[in-house]
Amino acid sequence: MKTQQNYDFDVIVVGSGITGGWAAKELTEKGLKVLVLERGRDVKHGSGYLGEHAPGWKQPFNGKPDRELEARDYPVQSKLYAFSAANRHFWNNDRLNPYAVDEGKPFDWFRGDVVGGRSLMWGRQSYRWSPQDFRANATDGHGIPWPVEYEDIAPWYSHVEKFIGVNGRKEGLAQLPDGEFQKPMEWFPIEKTIQARLRKSAPDITLTNARTAILTEDLPGRSACHYCGPCENGCSTGSYFSSQASTLPAARATGNLTLRPDSVVEKLQYDEATGRISAIHVVDAQTMARRAYTARAYFLCASTIGSTQLLLNSASAAFPNGLANRSGVLGHYLMDHFLSIGAVGMFAEHSDTYFYGNRPTGLYIPRFRNVGKRDDDADFIRGYGYQTMINSSNWMGQLNAKGFGAALKNQLSALPPTWVFYMAGFGECLPRKSNRLYLSKKKDRFGVPQVAFDFEWGDNERAMGKDIQKQALRIVNAAGPAFAIPIGDTENLSTPGAGIHEMGTARMGDDPGESVLNRYNQAHDVPNLFVTDGSFMTSASCVNPSLTYMAFTARACDYAAQQLAAGVI
């Protein structure tokens, strides 16, 4: 295929996950010929995600973990709650595709290895940033100011929400702006009781639905959730948003999409004469054959770490420290959310009630600390929110039960069920130059330098962690449980990367001397380069970031299409 001026394509998109799928949809719908390069293998939506990894008795070990295999091939990926024998083929093989875990400091890099990437396994929680989030850096002096305000992104949030389908409740909170919601998922009776008690005993707390990209009302080509679970194994009805179910089919319907799986991008070629990228170099993951493609513009959507790895590896005489890196900040200001600190409450009420099916999400407690201004009793800045989970269990009795066989089964069956209400905080990480990723001298099997990490939590995160646990106990106790216990280690926060919300490393800003990208996700130094995955983030907020990535991607595509039409790039 050749487009005008003998380019192979109008735009090349690297990555087919949450942002790559959106870039493909938006650009093709604007009439542009788009190539999507995905390093993972193909997975067809609706044809049976599990493939040979079918559920139940057809799986080896009846679906139980193959410990030797996981220790050998998936030592990092298998740490994650969403990893299982049923979806193991979605994940990166750590033995075949390593990163330099023995250099620098510990960092868990969770990677998909299929078309759609982590959009198949993500948690689907979708929250808007608030005006305070976008102004935080400018307000407290940590990081550089964002070049945009909430009002700039709000229309794009709406654009994305309407297409992906987000269920939730409108609460009218300044710190968690409402969006375009489908009807919320039903609550368990015990959750309604907890909410009623919190309204009396902890009125500063809002307990609301987790706003999730899971349909409760049909959309074209996708059905409302039927509560089957587990979602991370893939959703053949497209009830939750993924690239396969939503954006890639939309892009394919235009006739303008070319998708090439098993395509490992090695580097971008910079032409000093034009000041633009002239080609992208790719290795076939199956044959190891190398080839190059050309386009008028390039979108990097390979994940924060993947895109920055590519930019660092695309160094040249013009950019000796990485492509588009005259500022010197590429690879720096890496961020993630820390998690797994909170509290658990055990409730005996409503033991005879149960909401049908497997509801695929919990409830949410939005940020309530340092809202508007810093609280007098807070020894930290920024804030956090809580994600909750409810389970019916006779867990307490099971811990003390004795015996085996029929006697044990009868004993457990006689125990009354207890509701377990679990709440864990997601805390904001401040942007620091010292937190970074860099290229190792080690290379992978494709000849690409591996990445290594130098990242650690700071005093602000540790102070926030202590407050997360303290406030969680207050909240759970206000809900009137049989008893409550704290969870998490406030001295040793979660391993960096465990939040699966890696951000930063190619941040946006108005000053080209302090940032890689401008307000439209376009590289200051290379006008036909756009980066719209988590790399562009200038701060982290405390909410799940994927909705923000998608909104910025759609906005960047609109801008790029205008620039291409005008012949500027």
Image (tube, helix red, strand yellow):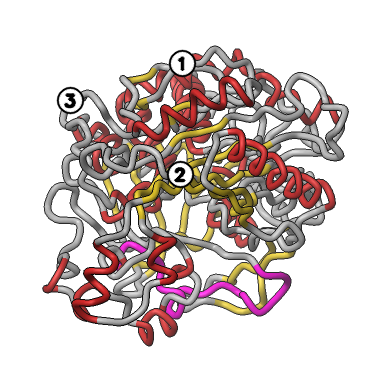
Instruction: State the image coordinates of residue 212 (x, y, percent, origin top left).
Output: 39, 33
**Residue 565: quarter of image:** top left
Which of the image's four quarters has the N terminus? top left
Given this view, does label 3 or label 2 mark the residue nearer the observer?
Answer: 2
Residue with the mark numbered 3: 220
Q: Are marks 3 and 2 in contact (CB under 8 Å)?
A: no
Instruction: State the image coordinates of residue 537 (x, y, percent, origin top left).
Output: 64, 38
Marking on residue 224: none
**Residue 411: quarter of image:** bottom left
Q: Is residue 302 above or below residue 88?
A: above
Residue with the mark numbered 1: 170
Q: CA distance from mark 3 to mark 1?
A: 24 Å
Classify mark 2: residues with Cα within 10 Å, few (<14), some (14-19) or many (20+). many
**Amino acid found under the numbered disc labelled 1:** Lys
Q: Residue at x 86, y 39 (%)?
A: 379
Q: Nearer the viewer, residue 507 or 527?
A: 507
Q: Is residue 485 above or below residue 30?
A: below
Which span of residues is magenta-colored?
89-106
Residue with the mark numbered 2: 347
> As drawn, is 53 to the left or to the right of 199?
left
Q: Answer whether residue 1 is visible to the viewer in this image.
A: no
